[in-house]
Image (cartoon, rainbow, N blue to C red):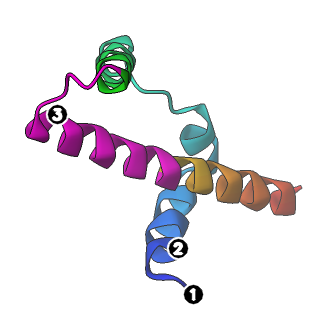
Amino acid sequence: MKAYEEVVEFIAAQGPREVIEFKPSEAARGRVWDLIEREKTGGLSAEEKVELDHYLEVEHLMRLAKARARQLLAHEK
């Protein structure tokens, strides 16, 4: 098992339906969109680049957790 898979399993097991339904707030989505757009033009500070990178890592983990949560729900049926 890869180290991050433990985190994915933990998140998915907390409440598979809740994990699947989770969406970042409008403010968070707007912030990330702004960072992505500004990154394309080279306008991010080092701190903003770190913020964007962290968000992308978390987003990847959440996608994995949502996929695992769907598997858990499928096995419940």
Q: Mark 3 points at which residue?
A: 48
User: Is residue 42 found inside the magenta-colored segment of the image?
Assistant: yes
Marks counted in the figure total 3
Q: Are marks 2 and 1 in contact (CB under 8 Å)?
A: yes
- Front in this rendered view, residue 71 or 48: 48
Please tell me in which quadrant of the rendered image residue 1 appears: bottom right
Q: Which contiguous range is marked in magenta?
A: 41-61
Task: State the SS at label 1.
Answer: loop
Q: Quadrant of the C terminus?
A: bottom right
- Front in this rendered view, residue 59 or 68: 59
User: Is residue 70 found inside the magenta-colored segment of the image?
Assistant: no
Packing grade of label 2 (10 A; few <14, some 14-19, many >=20) is: some
Disc assigned to residue 68: none
As drawn, 27 above or below 16: above
The residue furthest bottom is 1
- Front in this rendered view, residue 53 or 72: 53
Task: State the SS at label 3.
Answer: helix
Disc assigned to residue 1: 1
Q: Distance between the residues labelled 2 and 3?
A: 27 Å
Q: Are marks 3 and 1 in contact (CB under 8 Å)?
A: no
Tag 2: residue type?
A: Glu
Q: Is the magenta stretch mostly helix, strand or loop?
A: helix
Residue at 29 percent across and 37 percent down: it is: 52
